[in-house]
Image (cartoon, grey):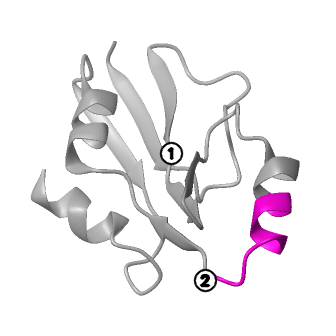
C-alpha cells in the first residue's frame, strides 16, 4: 500500500468510492459514552439504541477521540499518509495526531 487517507469518524465519509490506485481510506472511530454504556462510532453503531439510551438518562454524554494507538494501527502499511481530523477546538484528535 502506498497511500492511506485516514480520518476520524467525525468525517462525513465511512468509505470512499473509487479511490486512486494504491490508496486506501480508513475511518478511525471516536467513542461516545452515554451513562454507563460506550458506543463505538463505526459502521456497526446502532444509532437508534444510542439515542434511546441518551433520552433515558439525565447524565451528559461524552465523546472521546481515537487513541494514538488507533491511529498507528490505521497507518500500518502505508508509505504516505494524509490525515483528516476534527478541529482541535472541538476534539483532541488533532492534538494526538501530532504525537505520532
x, y percent for residue 15: 67, 32
x, y percent for residue 11: 61, 55
Quadrant of the snapshot with the N terminus = top left
- In the visual, does 47 lie left or right of 2? right
The residue tagged 2 is 60
Identify which residue, 28 or 87, lies in the foreground.
Answer: 28
x, y percent for residue 10: 59, 59
Establish if 81 lies above or below 85.
above
Identify which residue, 70 or 81, lies in the foreground.
Answer: 70
Q: Residue 70: give its label.
A: none
The answer to which image quadrant residue 81 occupies is top left
Secondary structure of the residue carrying tag 2 is loop
- In the visual, does 29 lie left or right of 46? left
Residue occupying the far left of the picture: 99
Q: Which residue corresponds to the image point at 67% horizontal and 31% vertical from the top-left? A: 16
Q: Which residue corresponds to the image point at 17% horizontal and 62% vertical from the top-left? A: 98
Secondary structure of the residue carrying tag 1 is loop
Q: Which residue corresponds to the image point at 54% horizontal and 62% vertical from the top-left? A: 33
The residue tagged 1 is 29
Amino acid at each position: 500500500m502506498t497511500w492511506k487517507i485516514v480520518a476520524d469518524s467525525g468525517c462525513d465519509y465511512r468509505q470512499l468510492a473509487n479511490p486512486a490506485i494504491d490508496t486506501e481510506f480508513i475511518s478511525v472511530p471516536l467513542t461516545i459514552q452515554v451513562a454507563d454504556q460506550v458506543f463505538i462510532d463505526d459502521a456497526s453503531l446502532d444509532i437508534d439504541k444510542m439515542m434511546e439510551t441518551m433520552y433515558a438518562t439525565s447524565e451528559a454524554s461524552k465523546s472521546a477521540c481515537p487513541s494514538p494507538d488507533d491511529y498507528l494501527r490505521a497507518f500500518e502499511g502505508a508509505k504516505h499518509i494524509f490525515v483528516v481530523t476534527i478541529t482541535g477546538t472541538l476534539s483532541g484528535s488533532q492534538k494526538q495526531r501530532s504525537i505520532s
